[in-house]
Every structure is written in C-alpha cells, then in structure tokens.
Amino acid sequence: MDLACFRGERAIFAGLSFGLAASDALLLVGANGAGKSTLLRLLAGLLAPAEGQLLWDGVDALADRAAHAGRLRYLSHQDALKPALTVRENLAFFARLWSSKAGGGDTDAALAALDLAPLAELPARVLSSGQKRRLALARLALAPAALWLLDEPTVGLDAASVERLGSLLARHRAAGGMVLAATHLPLPLPGARELRL
C-alpha cells in the first residue's frame, strides 16, 4: 500500500497501491526506466520499499522474507541458468531446491510444458536465446507458488513458444494462481488488468 521506491534523490514511483486476488493477472506497462523491473524486485522481497508496506493477506509480507519467497516465483531479465548443466539438469536443480518447500515438480512435465524434451540432454550453453528463455520459464511448471512475477517473459520467444507460455499461465490461474508481469508486448493473459507506470 502506498509503495515508494527511490534511486538516489529520484523517485522511481511513489504512492503506488494495487491488489491481486486468486486467479488475477496484472500487466505492468510503461516506458523503459518507468520502474517496472524495480517494482517486481520490490514485490519479490529483493528491495525494501522506501515508503509504504507490502501486504499479503493483510500482513506485512516482508516480516518473514523466507515465507514470502516460498509463495512466489520470480523470473527476471536474466535466465539464471547453469551453462555447463543440461536442460534436464538445470530443471532438476530447481526441482530439488523447491522440493522441501513445495513438493518439487516433475522435470518431464516441465520439459513438455515449453517443448524442451528434444533439447533435454543439451548443455544450456549451446541453446539459442529463445531456448534459454523457454528453459527459464519451464521452472514455473516445477513447483506450485501462489504468485508469479515475470519480467518481460516473452523476450526472444517465437509465436509457438508464446502460445505454450499462454497455456502454462492459464493452468496457473485456473488453479488460483496470480500473475504479475512487466511487458512491452501483448501477453496471453485474457482479462488481465493494466497498471501503467
């Protein structure tokens, strides 16, 4: 509520309030430098607000950062892949990481969600930028989390991959999940609201 973030003396945003409910989608739109990525980092708990409070069910979400991290998945501009690991090994790493918290998921299902099965045994370093982005997005299929924070999720994706992402987003929302995405391009999120920064 009434979130503000400053960089030096410059306000990136101030007085920002919005809410999300189960199955909601919100698109962050605006010019480069408007604060979309900064807001996502703040919502992920990686930055503290200069003013205001981030609430989850009426409680300060940042009071217990570990609990807050467990209820979300954050996908930034960077794909965060281990180049020497195969596609399957990269997913298996995250499945193990999340298994104790959320019942870490099925790597085969994650591979299928973004059509990565044919690439499963290739090291991540040989993938194209679009394939790397698909691999990063496939992590979303591994373990349930209430909130997905996505920063430009379609960068580098072809039309077929965007359609697959749309199916993944639809399944998440159908299960009550929320999506908050920063984007300059249309996303397959029917009924999404927009917040212009």
Image (tube, rainbow, N blue to C red):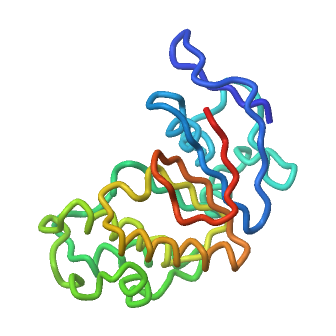
Specify the quadrant of the image occupied by residue 118.
bottom left
Figure disc tally: 0
Residue 20 position in % (x across, y down): 76, 55
Q: Is residue 84 left or right of residue 79?
A: left
Residue 17, percent from left and from top: 77, 36
- Residue at point 30%, 58% (across, down): 156
- Residue 174 vs 35, above or below: the answer is below
Picture quarter with the N terminus:
top right
Q: Residue at x 78, y 49 (%)?
A: 19
- In percent of width and height, residue 178 lies at 68, 63
Q: Residue at x 51, y 72 (%)?
A: 166
Between residues 185 and 82, which one lies in front from this camera angle?
Answer: 185
| Image quarter hosting the C terminus | top right
| Identity of the residue furthest to the top in this view | 9
What residue appears at the point 28 percent right and 87 percent down from the top-left corner? 117
Q: Is residue 104 above or below residue 193?
A: below
Q: Nearer the viewer, residue 56 or 16?
A: 16
Q: Quadrant of residue 39?
A: top right
Would residue 154 appear left or right of 7 to someone viewing this image?
Answer: left
Vertical placement of residue 166 versus 41, above or below: below
Residue 164 occupies which quadrant of the picture? bottom left
Question: How far from the left and from the top, in percent, is residue 113?
Answer: 43, 82
Relative vertical location of residue 74 with respect to residue 158 in this rendering, above or below: above
Q: Please give left or right for residue 155 compared with residue 39 in the image.
A: left
Q: Residue furthest left?
A: 126
Residue most toward the right? 58
Does residue 49 appear left or right of residue 182 in this picture? right
